[in-house]
Image (cartoon, grey):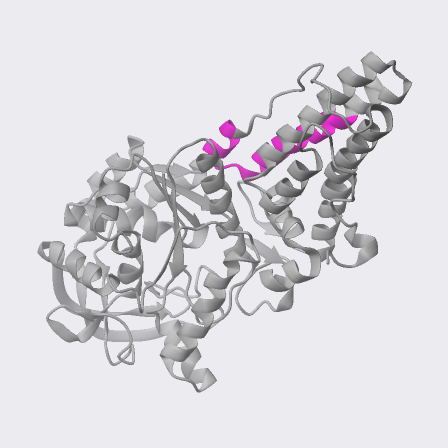
Amino acid sequence: MYLTTTIPYVNARPHLGHALELVQADVLARHHRRRGEPVRFQTGTDDNSLKNVLAAEAAGVPVQELVDRNAAAFEGLRGPLDLSFDSFIRTSVHPGHRAGVERIWEATRHDLYQRHYEGLYCVGCEQFYPEGPCPDGHEAALQRVSEQNWFFRLSRYQDALSELIRSGRLRIEPVARRNEVLAFIEAGLDDLSVSRSAARARGWGIPVPGDPDQVVYVWWDALANYVTALEGDDYDRWWVSERRKVHLMGKGVIRFHAVYWPAMLLSAGRPLPTEIFVHDYLTVDGRKISKSSGGAADPVALVDAYGVDAVRWWLLREVPRVGDADFTEERLVARADEDLANGLGNLVNRVATMVHRFLDGNVPPAGEELAAVPVDEALEAFDFRRAATAVWALVEEANRYVERTRPWQRSRAGQEAALGTLVHACRTLAVQLEPFLPTAAARVAAAVAGERLPRPEPLFRRLATAGAAG
């Protein structure tokens, strides 16, 4: 599986919405690796945006300095969020990116032409709209722009795109997003402006081949990252030969990935992605999280305060497959305490304590096996909340098993059967939990490892009383 996230602008530091997409992708990557499947998990940053230029001007620093600083913050999420990405591309400095964009431009030149264009431009979205306000909620007024641009004959690919999606060769999930894309395509596609004046871009970006007065439209530039990051044999291995090429993204950019990007590839004669999963937004007080949302949306600050397990678990257990999710620190704390401290932590500690009390720490064979964890089906549907809930069903089943069997009231043989079953369930939990909470899973695995268990220690601190995870 070649698994990619979108690459965000770096006009500011990352927020919790970026963390959501990265954590979702990380779960998929870890899950498929655990099943023995080859995975390349790629993310990165979109450095060549006018938004980045304007942010640098506002800060009074060179564009490259601002881009370098903020891109480092995005790449630095690897540690705090326990991410396992294999590749991180930055479009302003990756050695093969500019040449790769130029190759795609030349391969699509038969579908490119110049004409004058005038329209309303949203810098936040980096796209034109027929009228305002911005449908994605950016508050800045749309700018009227009039200039000579290069255009791509998107209209030529309307039927091909519709057939691609209807046939399932390009799978879009959830179905409502698939239907949204089809409705957009079948309402009629207009040709797409794919360059900007170099003057308006302040000279930042990739020059149009053969036309230095224009720079390549940032979205054309950014979408190309999925192939420009693959150099040499990697391109053949992961883009040409790989059976599953999966893009994860937020709902605000679906048109770029499900319409513009496949059309670019069709025009260039390149292979297409196979799957697109679209998540909705995180909100704070009902408003979409943005880079200006403040400390409540800073994923690193949240990890520092509450721990990586609490942050990842809220993103996976609380965010629905369809619909926005409103974030508060109180909800994060409540979910972590209920599930991690009171649920999983209490179960593992209780089981280990009974094994030491009744069996001198020695682990007997399992008497029976508790219900299987149906994670595969949920993750195949990109339903992370259902997958996390499936793992948690085993925690609940094991806790019910403790109350049903009451090992402390059983004979030695009964204690061995019950506690062997419970240790096996905890070990299964450690394995099943690893894609979701790799740090917590490692602690659970260590707590129930070996033929003789280590002395039990608390696995999770209760955040509501402790105030932080430490």
379 sits to left or right of 147:
right
Q: Is residue 201 visible?
A: yes
Check residue 177 for magenta coloring.
no
Which of the 4 quarters of the picture holds residue 374? Answer: top right
Q: Which residues are magenta?
A: 376-399
258 sits to left or right of 320:
left
Looking at the picture, does residue 100 appear above or below residue 393?
below
Residue at the image position 33 percent from the left and 36 percent from the top: 244
Helix, strand or loop for the magenta stretch, by majority: helix
Q: Where residue 392 sits in the image (x, y, percent)?
A: 67, 33
Q: Where residue 351 sits in the image (x, y, percent)?
A: 78, 30
Residue at the image position 41 percent from the left and 84 percent from the top: 57
Q: Where residue 445 sits in the image (x, y, percent)?
A: 65, 36
Looking at the picture, does residue 396 appear above or below residue 217?
above
Q: Where residue 324 sits in the image (x, y, percent)?
A: 57, 49
Q: Nearer the viewer, residue 329 or 23?
A: 23
